[in-house]
Amino acid sequence: MNTTTANQSDCPEVKVPFALFFTIGAVSLAENLLVVVAVLWNRNLHSPMYCFICSLAAFNTIASLTKTWENLMIVFASVGHLKKTGSSELNLDDVMDSLLCMSFVGSIFSFLAIAVDRYITIFHALRYHNIMTMRRAKAILGVIWLICGLSAVLMVKFFDSNFIKICFVVFFVVSVAIICFLYVYMFMLARIHARKIAALPASGVPKCRRQRWWGRSRRGALTVTILFGVFVVCWAPFFLHLIIITVCPENPYCECYRSLFQLHVVLLMSHALVDPAIYAFRSAELRHTFRKMQLWRRCS
């Protein structure tokens, strides 16, 4: 995906060591694979929400694998083992760009699915298991992966067109706006419901149980909100880069921002690195699963 051109400004291009790219890619790949294995291994995590989180981790795994392999190709090309303009190398580069686009689109749809799941969990708790069944969750995931695969191929095939770049940016902005609106609306309603629960007359255990349930539901929604905030912070500079190369490709001031492109890629890769740490820090069930997997490995 050609997102860089010759730097015509006085701002030198910021170079990031390939070792850093490779380290971030390798560590994030291992972390996200661990999350996927943990969700598949623990039957207590076989719920719609954790299926969507597993899907998000799988898309992060694809992104980490893609960037790690791309960095290896750059290293091989720098020592003369690969041709930068060879037909097979260019085709492989298109495949990796498609996978990266697929990872991005999949992350957006996964966050949207998780947001809807949290909304149903909080405000339709009694009907949750009838609304969000595992069968429907699997169908939703199937549709998400199909759409992501098709959109990734189209994006890379026609990425040189400014129209596609604009559509890519608009999709990001609109998706972020929709998800943010959903979360703000959800937390506002949650606050109102929490006040109503607090105003109920004391009735012993039932009220305590409802308060604990609300606490767990809000904690889950807060975890997803943190994940989404990290996603926006990590991907936004890259999309600003796309806007700049579309709107002002030769402006020297724009070139100064574009000289930071490798730092934007580091941020983009860091998203897949940070997400698993948030899962482990916020989810007691996942932490428990990781410990059980570690003990099982030691015993075996």
Image (cartoon, rainbow, N blue to C red):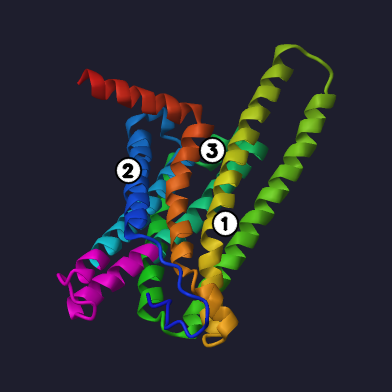
* Residue labelled with disc 1: 233
* Residue labelled with disc 3: 130
**Residue positioned 34% across, 68% down in the render:** 98
Residue 62 visible? The answer is no
Kind of residue indicated by mark 3: Asn
Q: Nearer the viewer, residue 183 or 257?
A: 257
**Residue positioned 79% across, 38% down in the render:** 192
Marks 1 and 3 close (CB-CB < 8 Å): no
In the rendering, at what x and y percent does residue 17 appear? 36, 60
- Disc 2 from disc 1: Cα separation: 22 Å
Q: Nearer the viewer, residue 281 or 146?
A: 281
* Residue labelled with disc 2: 30
Q: Which stretch did the figure color magenta?
A: 74-100
Q: Earlier in the sequence, mark 2 or mark 3?
A: 2
- Disc 2 from disc 3: Cα separation: 35 Å
Regarding mark 3 in the picture, which secondary structure is present there?
helix
Kind of residue indicated by mark 2: Ala
Left or right of 233 in this view: 87: left
Left or right of 108 in this view: 207: right
